[in-house]
Image (cartoon, rainbow, N blue to C red):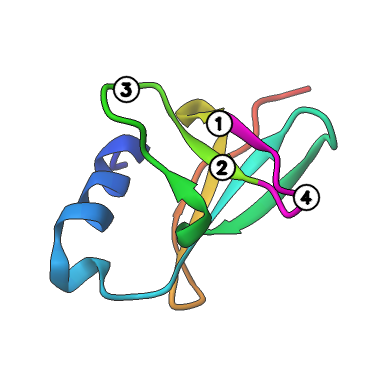
Amino acid sequence: MTPIHALLARVRWDPEFGAARFVIGYYDRITRAQVQVPLEHIRFPPGEGFGFGVQAEDGTAHTVPYHRVRSVWRNDVLIWHRHAPPA
């Protein structure tokens, strides 16, 4: 399986592959549920190798570590998935 950081790098830097609509699903520890956000709401701070920034619908920003990413959708097709760890 492709590591999530490698997949997101391809989305960002491969013009042909990245010319699509992407949605990232990650586990939110507060709501204890998977949250889906469009790639346009995600920021990749320079030098950050362990996660990315997300701006929530209420305008607050937070960091999501890569290990909490659970799914990646490209044009409404699931292209990457990680099973949730046992509770």
Image quadrant holding the C terminus, namely top right
Type of residue at label 4?
Answer: Asp
Residue denoted by label 4: 58
Mark 2–mark 1 Cα distance, whole angstroms, equals: 7 Å
Residue located beneath label 2 in the image: 54
Q: Earlier in the sequence, mark 1 or mark 3?
A: 3
Q: Earlier in the sequence, mark 3 or mark 2?
A: 3
Outermost residue, right side: 31
| 62 drawn magenta | yes
Q: Is residue 18 left or right of residue 87?
A: left
Residue in view at x 36 percent, y 38 percent: 44
Of 67 and 50, the residue lying toward us: 50
Labels 2 and 1: the sequence-earlier one = 2
Earlier sequence position, callout 4 versus callout 1: 4
Residue that carries the numbered disc 1 in the rendered image: 64
Density class for disc 3 (Cα within 10 Å; few <14, some 14-19, many ≥20) is few
Which sits earlier in the primary sequence, circle 3 or circle 4?
3
Residue 59: x, y in percent?
70, 47
Q: Are marks 2 and 1 in contact (CB under 8 Å)?
A: yes
Mark 3 lies on a secondary structure that is loop
Question: Which residue position holds label 3?
Answer: 49
Estimate the x, y position of residue 14 in percent, counting from the top left: 14, 60
Give the label on residue 77, or none.
none
The amino acid type found where label 2 is placed reads Val
**Mark nearer the viewer, 4 or 1:** 4
Asked whether, in this view, residue 49 is left or right of residue 16, the answer is: right
Q: Which stretch did the figure color magenta?
A: 56-63
Which residue is found at the position 31% from the left and 42% from the top? Answer: 1
Classed neighbour count for the residue bearing mark 2: other residues with Cα under 10 Å, few (<14), some (14–19), many (≥20): many
Real-space CA distance between mark 3 and mark 4, rounded to the nearest whole angstrom = 26 Å
